Amino acid sequence: MCTRCDDFARTVVMLGKLALYASTLGADEEFIEVAGPSLAASLPDPPPGVFPPGYNPDAGPRYPGGSS
């Protein structure tokens, strides 16, 4: 597996583990609030083949509260 693929997969796994931790009794909410966005922001570009050809994440419906 390529280095970029390894980084992407490792970060996605950590996000999944954080989500599981967040659902446990007594989870540290402050840690979750800090670590979650930080992990998400550190996601590298996805490896080739994750999204279909021509996929545009900016195309699609506008979300409430989003920029106009």
Image (spheres, rainbow, N blue to C red):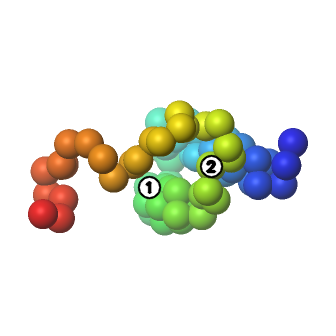
Q: Residue 11: tell me if it is visible.
A: yes
> Which residue corresponds to mark 2?
46
> Horizontally, is 26 left or right of 48 in the view?
left
Quarter of the figure with residue 51: top right
The residue labelled by disc 1 is 29
Q: Is residue 3 above or below residue 60?
A: below
Classify 10 Å Cα crowding around label 2: few (below 14), some (14-19), many (20 and above).
Answer: few
On residue 3, which mark appears? none
First-in-chain label (2 vs 1): 1
**Where residue 29 sits: x, y (%)?**
44, 55
Residue at 26%, 42% (x, y): give it.
60
* Of the pair 19 and 26, the residue shown nearer to us: 19
User: Residue 46, how many percent across, how many down?
Assistant: 62, 49
Q: Quadrant of the C terminus?
A: bottom left
Residue 59 appears left or right of 24:
left
Q: Residue at horizontal 17%, vertical 64%?
A: 67
Foreground pick, 39 / 17: 39
Relative to 34, residue 12 above or below: above
Q: Residue furthest front?
A: 54
Q: Is residue 31 visible?
A: no
Where does the image place residue 32, in percent across and percent down from the top left?
Answer: 49, 55
Residue at disc 2, secondary structure: loop
Q: Amino acid at mark 2?
A: Pro
Outermost residue, right side: 1
